[in-house]
Amino acid sequence: MTGLGVASQLLEIVMALLLAPLLSGWINQCRAWLQNKSGAGLLQPYRMLHKLFNKESLISEHASPLFRGAPYIVFGCMALASAIIPTLSTDLPLSPAADAIALVGLFAVARVFISLAAMDVGTSFGTFGARREMLIGFLAEPALLMVLFSASLISKSTSLTTIVETLAHRHLAIYPSLALAGVAFTMVSLAENARVPVDNPATHLELTMIHEALILEYSGRHLALLEWAASLKLFAYSCIGLALFFPWGVAEAEAPLALLLAMPVLILKLAIGGVLLALLETLSAKMRIFRVPEFLATAFLLAVIGMLVSILLGQ
């Protein structure tokens, strides 16, 4: 591992940490514009994180060390996931770790710890949210794996870097398998990131919230880490979608100059994706929690059909 490679990898990690809150602020601002509201501004997530990091963390006397350590574990998992996804370059020190199964495993580890922490204090809302979170994860993770496997059939590898390099050098064409996988991935992303129509990130209604119920007992720096981790998860899923379906513009060298040239392309793609996500949320209505299994089962079936189409057509 050369010093240049380490510097390039650190540049990608720092960029993910800085851009993740900005992406959340951009989506919230676009939603406000589409609803004829002024919005809180692009920098509101940064102001919120700054405020929370400067507040005292209040912890229940019944909390165990798991409750205290979960925010750091969840944040670490999301930061590592953002680091191994080929966002700027496919030739970085952590690129060999960008395997589809390992990536889904990181998301699963974060989900398990935040769910256990929500149940640790013993509040009814925390347990309520943990059960719903595990239900969504139980259905969303297989669908995400099928999406990644659909793309891996084209590149003959489960490595995201190989998938990006293979698809980026192919002629521009619409692959039926990737089209089906793209719809399935969009549905999974909405569920995994607590977005409408599965969940509403702006709600605090006890009977409907999922993600907010998991973090109700947190405050101060612990809450800041969890909010930052949620932004990183949205950023990671956005970068996975760009890597699978819009891989153009990703550098193939570890030189910092190549990464700096790829950064404006990534920011432009994230900005367009944020507008589309805000538009999709604005046009959608929050569904009942009992309809979520049907929603994710449809995503799983679409991903499986995409795999079958890829096998039958050989592309």
Image: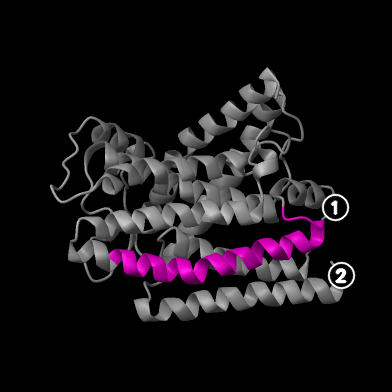
In the rendered image, which residue does mark 2 sit on? 314
Q: Residue at x 60, y 52 (%)?
A: 102
Which residue is painted at 27% across and 32% down in the image?
53
- The quarter of the picture where the N terminus appears is top right
Q: Which mark is residue 220?
A: none
Image x and y of residue 180, in percent: 68, 71
Which is nearer the eye, 310 or 29? 310
Can residue 209 be seen from the camera position used here? no
Q: CA distance from mark 1 to mark 2?
A: 15 Å
Number of callouts in the render? Answer: 2
Lower sequence index among marks 1 and 2 = 1
- At label 2, counting other C-alpha atoms closer than 10 Å, the crowd grade (few under 14, some 14-19, many 20 or more) is few
In this image, 202 relative to 105: left or right?
A: left
Seen in the picture, residue 303 relative to 63 is either above or below; the reply is below
Q: Which mark is residue 170?
A: 1
Among the 4 quarters of the image, the one containing residue 193 = bottom left
Label the magenta part by its dominant secondary structure: helix
